[in-house]
């Protein structure tokens, strides 16, 4: 899918020569641009450069980018599609916008019978609070099957900002989706162990939990963390500890991580991602680097994929909540992924939520929204 890659300096001096070389070698090519939040003001100039070269563009602004050196905010990453895929940039995602998105994705789908379902990759603005429900709605609207993957873009502060773009538009509150070529796959893993305590989100809406087991959400969360982990959680230290003790939504096959990011005055909690009322939950303790199953699973996936196609860029997305938990050890985890997979260089971004496809015998390939994952596309 991605045949080449390049990092640009903030002045974009190398942009014309880079695009000319790619378009000359691959005339049907296009580009996915990853822009760090610190350089968001450069997006209009970036767009002008693509228009000048008549080169198709999709792009998003993320909190930071990543490379084999770690996290960075002083360069822009370009990933070159060998052939620009069918795509849609839809904003806003009001009822009419959602319908238009469904129709655009439906029109992308190949009609060849018997072929394996292709992968739809989506980048949402993190301000869209019901990504899981939107992906479920898309799954139900499609007439032929797809596999799903994706991430959230935007500011790590979760403040609104235009963060999705093509060569002409820069928007917020929307989604970019494109259809990957046959054989492209993705994997997202968090590797968080499961705690003992079982809870029920008894009331709430979207990504807000009002009550747990019919009591104020923070009161229950506070008591469980004190009981299981010996930590006295208060309003004052909430932001220091919540990322280390996320909720896990219990599903029939595993647990989906939901990181609390805000404590309201009424004791309700806001999380990244929906918490359906009535859903069973556990409180998780985030693992240290080297613990859990995420890294071995990711490496195994990448090694298998490398045997099936020539070497190429492997976009990697690392959850901002995971980095908040691990701190400086997050770079160690990325370096270990790079070394063990043998890919010879990372390129990607810090994400604000991740999407994958349920993979389990006997269950449909439905999309799922995660926190705290590392996602690899290749």
Image (cartoon, rainbow, N blue to C red):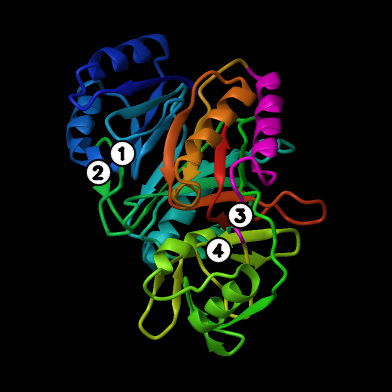
Label 4, label 3: how many angstroms apart (C-alpha)? 24 Å
Residue depth check, mark 4 versus mark 1: number of the one nearer the observer: 4
Residue 58, given in percent of the width and then of the height, sits at: 36, 36
Crowdedness of circle 2 by 10 Å Cα count: few (<14), some, many (20+)? few
Answer with mark 2 or mark 1, whichever residue precedes in sequence: 1
| Magenta stretch bounds | 285-309
The residue carrying mark 3 is 367
Foreground label between 4 and 3: 4
201 on left or right of 330:
right
Q: Residue at x 64, y 25 (%)?
A: 340
Q: Nearer the viewer, residue 346 or 136?
A: 346
Which tag is nearer the camera, tag 3 or tag 2?
Answer: 3
| Mark sitting earlier along the chain (2/4) | 2
3 vs 1, front mark: 1
How far across and how far down the image is residue 253, in percent?
75, 59
Q: Which residue is mark 2?
A: 169
């Amino acid at each position: 899918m991605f045949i080449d890659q390049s990092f640009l300096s903030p002045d974009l001096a190398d942009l014309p020569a880079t695009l000319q070389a790619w378009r000359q070698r691959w005339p049907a090519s296009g580009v996915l641009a990853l822009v760090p939040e610190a350089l968001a003001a450069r997006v209009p100039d970036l767009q002008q450069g693509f228009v000048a070269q008549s080169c198709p563009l999709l792009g998003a602004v993320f909190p930071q980018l990543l490379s084999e050196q770690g996290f960075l905010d002083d360069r822009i990453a370009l990933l070159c599609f060998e052939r620009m895929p069918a795509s849609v940039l839809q904003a806003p995602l009001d009822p009419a916008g959602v319908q238009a998105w469904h129709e655009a994705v439906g029109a992308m789908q190949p009609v060849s019978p018997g072929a394996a379902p292709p992968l739809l990759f989506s980048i949402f603005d993190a301000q869209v609070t019901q990504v899981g429900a939107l992906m479920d709605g898309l799954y139900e609207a499609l007439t032929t099957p797809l596999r799903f993957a994706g991430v959230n873009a935007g500011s790590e502060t979760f403040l609104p900002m235009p963060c999705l773009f093509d060569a002409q538009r820069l928007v917020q509150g929307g989604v970019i989706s494109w259809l990957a070529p046959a054989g492209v796959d993705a994997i997202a893993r968090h590797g968080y162990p499961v705690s003992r305590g079982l809870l029920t989100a008894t009331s709430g809406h979207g990504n807000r939990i009002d009550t747990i087991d019919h009591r104020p959400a923070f009161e229950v969360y506070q008591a469980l963390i004190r009981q299981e982990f010996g930590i006295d959680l208060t309003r004052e230290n909430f932001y220091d500890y919540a990322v280390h003790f996320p909720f896990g939504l219990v599903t029939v096959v595993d647990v989906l991580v939901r990181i609390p990011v805000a404590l309201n005055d009424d004791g309700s909690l806001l999380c990244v991602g929906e918490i359906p009322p009535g859903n069973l939950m556990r409180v998780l303790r985030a693992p240290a680097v080297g613990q859990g199953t995420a890294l071995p699973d990711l490496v195994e996936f990448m090694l298998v994929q490398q045997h099936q196609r020539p070497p190429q860029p492997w976009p990697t997305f690392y959850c901002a909540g995971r980095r908040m938990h691990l701190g400086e050890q997050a770079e160690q985890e990325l370096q270990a992924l790079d070394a063990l997979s043998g890919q010879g260089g990372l390129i990607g971004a810090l994400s604000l939520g991740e999407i994958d496809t349920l993979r389990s015998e006997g269950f449909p390939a439905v999309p799922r929204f995660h926190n705290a994952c590392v996602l690899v596309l290749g």
